[in-house]
Image (cartoon, rainbow, N blue to C red):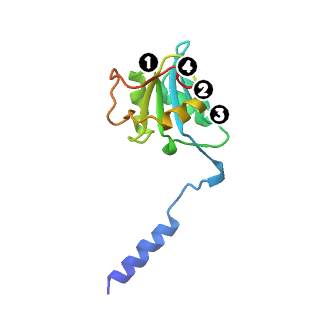
Amino acid sequence: MIRIPIYILIIALVFIAPVTRVDVGALRPVEVVALHQENGEMILQTDTGDLGRGADVELALRDMKQKTPAVIYLDTAKYLLVDINVQHDAEALRGYLKSNVKVALFCDSIDLKYAGMYLDVQDDLMAFKDWKPGVLVTVLTSEKYF
């Protein structure tokens, strides 16, 4: 008999718990995330055209989220492109991207929209959970998809 009031209390708590609501229309699903460095600043870009700059990866991500009018939704990211020179900095993204995101390196400027289409047909990409800085994975250059 004591279980019924406990169940009622649990159900009531579920309905009054504070929840941050997000309009689905305000979400900006990301497929490709790219990390590189320019003039000593970390640059984080997405295939949706969003860009963030900062002294480190976390600050670049915060900057990108503040500048974007929509909510950056990194859970939909399929690919992480890392500049060869900032591989160790990419470790900071482990808490923000899913572990099954596929990793590729790049060494010159690339168009992220085309990179996503190219990467969709690649079978040899390593998952972020298995990748470590210095491990050679697919390297993209601009001529690979033009």
Q: Nearer the viewer, mark 3 or mark 1?
A: 1
Mark 4 in CB contact with mark 1 (< 8 angstroms): no
Left or right: where 89 falls relative to 18: left
Q: Distance of mark 4 from mark 1, alpha carbons?
A: 17 Å
Q: Which residue is mark 4?
A: 143
Q: Which residue is mark 1?
A: 84
Badge 4 density bin: few <14, some 14–19, many ≥20, Cα 10 Å = few
SS category of the residue bearing label 2: loop
Left or right: where 92 falls relative to 42: left
Q: Which residue is mark 2?
A: 111
Question: Which mark identifies residue 67?
Answer: 3
Residue 125 screen position, x and y as percent: 39, 33
Quarter of the image where the N terminus is located: bottom left
Q: Residue at x 51, y 69 (%)?
A: 15
Badge 2 density bin: few <14, some 14–19, many ≥20, Cα 10 Å = few
Up/down of 142 relative to 103, above or below: above
Q: Quadrant of residue 129?
A: top left
Q: Earlier in the sequence, mark 3 or mark 4?
A: 3
